[in-house]
Amino acid sequence: MKRLLLFDIDGTLVKGGPAKMAFIQAMASVFGTDGTFDRHDFSGKTDPQIARELLRVAGLGDREIDAGFAELWPAYLEELERRLPHHPMTVLPGVRPLLHRLEKADGVALGLLTGNIMDGARLKLGSVGLMEHFPIGGFGSDSEIREDLPAVAIRRATLAWGTTFHPSSVVVVGDTPRDVACGKHGGTRTVAVATGPFSAEALVATGADRVLPDLGDLELALEALLA
């Protein structure tokens, strides 16, 4: 293996779906509040970070928040699984052919780097037949701090493929400045795609190694990821 590609999920591989409503319902049922959900910035954050920020705004302390997390995540996953058939995820343009090409490429390993908790990621991607492409990953359930996740994913990739991936041979692919920042923190290359809430200009300003409008141009995407 020569290259490890770590993909974000929401806004990079897929969009839409019922996750926000499932999260709101779970927060309300477990904590009695969803905080200021409609006015909160979710982009590039981990699920536990989002929940903690919302609950702090609602006046809860960290001890109470931590105690409730054990109940929150099963409630969220139950709501997400129940809602997905009626509000499915949408796979973004170019994603399927790109993943198929990458799987056939010599020396390339695929994984996830996402703020979603692991089972949430599996439900989202499994609902559109993409989870099979990603045997490993770093998830919000591994650490509330996004910058911790590249090291988690690289460690799992090393165990899965029996080879050492130096950070310089790893590429983090995402759609937000926080995706770029966590890749840079981990010493990886970064490829940003303007398929989420941020424009190409905003992503260029992050210092990402490459910025693409989307993943729809297969040859351009392959060149950016494998250069």
Image: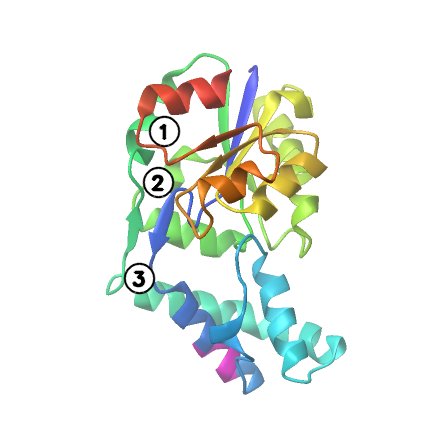
Corner quadrant of residue 31: bottom right
User: In this orientation, does residue 218 appear?
Assistant: yes
* Residue 130's disc number: 2
Where is the N terminus found, in terms of image quarters?
A: top right
Location of residue 196 in the rendering, given as x and y in whole percent from the top left corner? 42, 49
The answer to whether residue 201 is above or below residue 106 is below
Residue drawn at point x = 31 percent, y = 51 percent: 127
Let me know if residue 27 is in the magenta part.
yes
Q: Which residue is disc 1 drawn over?
A: 99
Which is nearer the eye, 205 or 79? 205
Identify the mark nearer the N-term, 3 or 2.
Answer: 3
Residue drawn at point x = 67 percent, y = 26 percent: 167
Q: Magenta region: which residues?
A: 25-29
Residue drawn at point x = 60 percent, y = 26 percent: 170
Let me know if residue 176 is in the magenta part.
no
Q: Which residue is disc 3 drawn over?
A: 84
